[in-house]
Image (cartoon, rainbow, N blue to C red):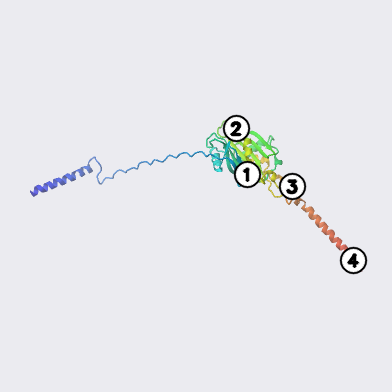
Amino acid sequence: MRKNLMRALLAALAMLVAPATAHADGRGNPGPDVAAPPVRAAPVQQPQQQPTAAPQGRTGVIPLNNGELTLNVPQGYRYYSAEEAYAYLQRNNAAAPTGTVVGMVARNGADIRAAGTWATIVSYDAVGYVQSETASGLSDAAFEAQVREARTTQNRTFEGFIAEPQFDATAPHVVWAERTAAPGAGGKDLRYEQKSLGRYGVAALTSIGSADQMPEIQEASDDLQAMLSFPEGRRHTDFQAANDQVSQYSVPGLITGVPTAQPQAVADTISSGQTNFGGLAGWFPWVALGVVGLALAGYMFVRRRRDDDELEEA
């Protein structure tokens, strides 16, 4: 009986061990000595980024650049920040204006991030007082060649004027339009410039668009010009020769971007004997010579009186 019990126990043990052995040696799952295949994590689904809504812009009176100039934007247009202006220039591969970009203006309802939208960059360049009297030579045949040469130095494309430079001495401001890419190249190939002269610098409205948008931009140019103004005390007519800095730029220099060798006003005032100190500094040598002459005459007079007195006493 003990033998039968032992056999039963061995048979039961064999039944328990046999499946494990077959499992390890057969074609089923690997046994304890075989590495299990790595478990790959399920790919993580990245949330789709929703496109941000286009900025809406704003209207009204907007002081810019610490009060250097003011923009009064009516309902038909919208003002956008300097950050949006720089982003617009980058998207359209357009050169930024000289000076400080302080914002951008576009028509109401225009999507400033759309490829076909034209917009106007607002900037201010503190170059000093630009004299209206320097606005000569704009219509010379050689002036366009000067602009072309300057653009080459500035690494900018210039395919000629679409609108010849015009200077308005009453405002005063200068307006012109240039083609920035060859005809048929596509994209933004028009740069319409309006530069207004102030007491301490120049404010610019630079409209970026395509050549076929020229009529629309030109039609809006009067509206754009009317938005821009200098506060009282910073207007071109507020210039004080005794205290203010005269710009190294002439009016043609505002177009080429090339300053002159010497401010014209400084040269004029030196030649006319009028500079600072209310225009008296140019006369200073003559005044000094007169004072010396008077002092010498007084000394001679006193010396002569003293000699006469000594003769009388003798």
The kind of residue on which mark 2 rests is: Glu
Q: Residue 307, how many percent across, how many down?
A: 89, 65
What label does residue 309 carry, if any?
4
276 and 180: which one is in front?
Answer: 276
Which badge, 4 or 1, is on the more N-terminal residue? 1
Q: Are marks 4 and 1 in contact (CB under 8 Å)?
A: no
For marks 3 and 1, give the CA distance: 29 Å
Disc nearest the viewer among 4 and 1: 1
Disc nearest the viewer among 2 and 4: 2
Question: Which quadrant of the structure image shows residue 145?
Answer: top right
For marks 2 and 4, give the CA distance: 93 Å
Question: Which quadrant of the structure image shows residue 300?
Answer: bottom right
Q: Residues within 10 Å of mark 4 (few under 14, many from 20)?
A: few
Which badge, 3 or 4, is on the more N-terminal residue? 3
Is residue 151 rendered to the left or right of residue 40? right
Residue at 14 percent across and 47 percent down: it is 10
* Residue under numbered circle 3: 269
Which badge, 2 or 3, is on the more N-terminal residue? 2
Which badge, 2 or 4, is on the more N-terminal residue? 2
179 and 100: which one is in front?
Answer: 100
* Residue under numbered circle 1: 69
Q: Residues within 10 Å of mark 3 (few under 14, many from 20)?
A: some
* Residue under numbered circle 2: 216
The kind of residue on which mark 3 rests is: Thr
For marks 3 and 4, give the CA distance: 51 Å
Look at the numbered disc 3 and give the secondary structure of its residue: helix
The kind of residue on which mark 4 rests is: Asp
190 and 184: which one is in front?
Answer: 190
Which badge, 3 or 1, is on the more N-terminal residue? 1
For marks 2 and 3, give the CA distance: 44 Å
Viewer can see residue 204: yes
